[in-house]
């Protein structure tokens, strides 16, 4: 019995060591002091670095993708400020996460009287979203909020301040992007800890 237990423990130890050796953990912090060297060219010139913050102060649709496209599990955190709108229209701040087999779309939507989180998964080649979830939330305007996303095989979780939203699981690998439509924003103190094969 003892020998069987030792073999089982050895197998578990070998599994964890091989997992650690097969993926490299990388920590990257971006305070936008050196511009946008860690990001692809934005979809619009409305995306700017102002006072060491990544911003879109317009209502126009923008998207900017992180340069690394081979991210496995990760923890992404940043401070987000939703700026006052230039018009009284519904809008959103978006985070899109590619997992190889499809994409997660996470929207922080705002209207004149309420705010909500919408989470959807789109399989490659499909137009209809799967695993759709919606949560009501209080999102202050012109005040920084702490955002944290945990994304791995076992969980896909969003934290805004002290509120936690369980969104599912997110196996696979890929890149991510940030953007907005009719919702100006500012981002600061971005940090990502991720596994790279």
Image: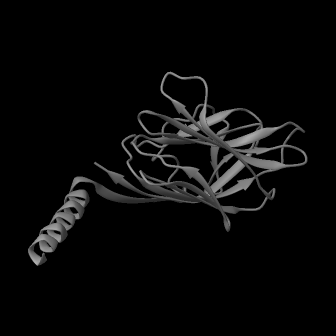
Q: Closer to the camera, 35 or 120?
A: 120
Left or right relative to 65: residue 59: right
Left or right relative to 156: residue 94: right
Q: Closer to the camera, 37 or 110?
A: 110
Residue 117: give x, y in percent of width and height.
Answer: 71, 48
Residue 172: give x, y in percent of width and height.
Answer: 39, 42
Residue 115: give x, y in percent of width and height.
Answer: 80, 49
Left or right relative to 111: residue 17: left
Identify which residue is drawn at 64% across, 54% down: 187
Identify which residue is drawn at 45% across, 47% down: 38
Identify which residue is drawn at 42% across, 33% down: 101
Q: Is residue 64 above or below residue 123?
A: below
User: Image quadrant of residue 143?
Assistant: bottom right
Q: Is residue 18 above or below residue 127?
A: below
Q: Closer to the camera, 53 or 189?
A: 189
Q: Residue furthest bottom?
A: 2
Identify which residue is drawn at 69% across, 32% down: 61
User: Image quadrant of residue 182?
Assistant: top right
Q: Closer to the camera, 113 or 10?
A: 10
How many numbered discs sit on the rendered protein? 0
Residue 191: give x, y in percent of width and height.
Answer: 50, 60
Q: Quadrant of the N terminus?
A: bottom left
Q: State how the image is colored.
A: one colour
Q: Residue furthest front?
A: 1
């Amino acid at each position: 019995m003892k020998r069987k237990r030792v073999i089982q423990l050895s197998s578990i130890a070998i599994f964890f060591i091989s997992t650690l050796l097969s993926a490299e953990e990388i920590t990257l912090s971006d305070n936008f002091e050196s511009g946008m060297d860690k990001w692809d060219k934005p979809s619009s010139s409305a995306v700017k670095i102002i006072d060491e913050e990544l911003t879109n102060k317009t209502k126009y649709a923008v998207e900017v993708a992180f340069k690394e496209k081979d991210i496995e599990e990760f923890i992404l955190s940043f401070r987000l400020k939703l700026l006052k709108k230039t018009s009284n229209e519904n809008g959103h701040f978006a985070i899109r996460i590619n997992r190889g087999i499809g994409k997660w779309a996470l929207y922080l939507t705002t209207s004149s009287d309420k705010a909500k989180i919408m989470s959807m998964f789109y399989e490659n080649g499909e137009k209809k979203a799967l695993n759709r979830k919606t949560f009501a939330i209080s999102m202050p305007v012109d005040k920084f909020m702490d955002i944290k996303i945990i994304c791995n095989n076992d969980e896909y979780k969003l934290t805004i301040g002290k509120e936690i939203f369980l969104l599912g699981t997110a196996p696979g690998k890929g890149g991510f992007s940030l953007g907005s439509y009719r919702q100006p924003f500012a981002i600061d103190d971005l940090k990502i800890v991720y596994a790279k094969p």
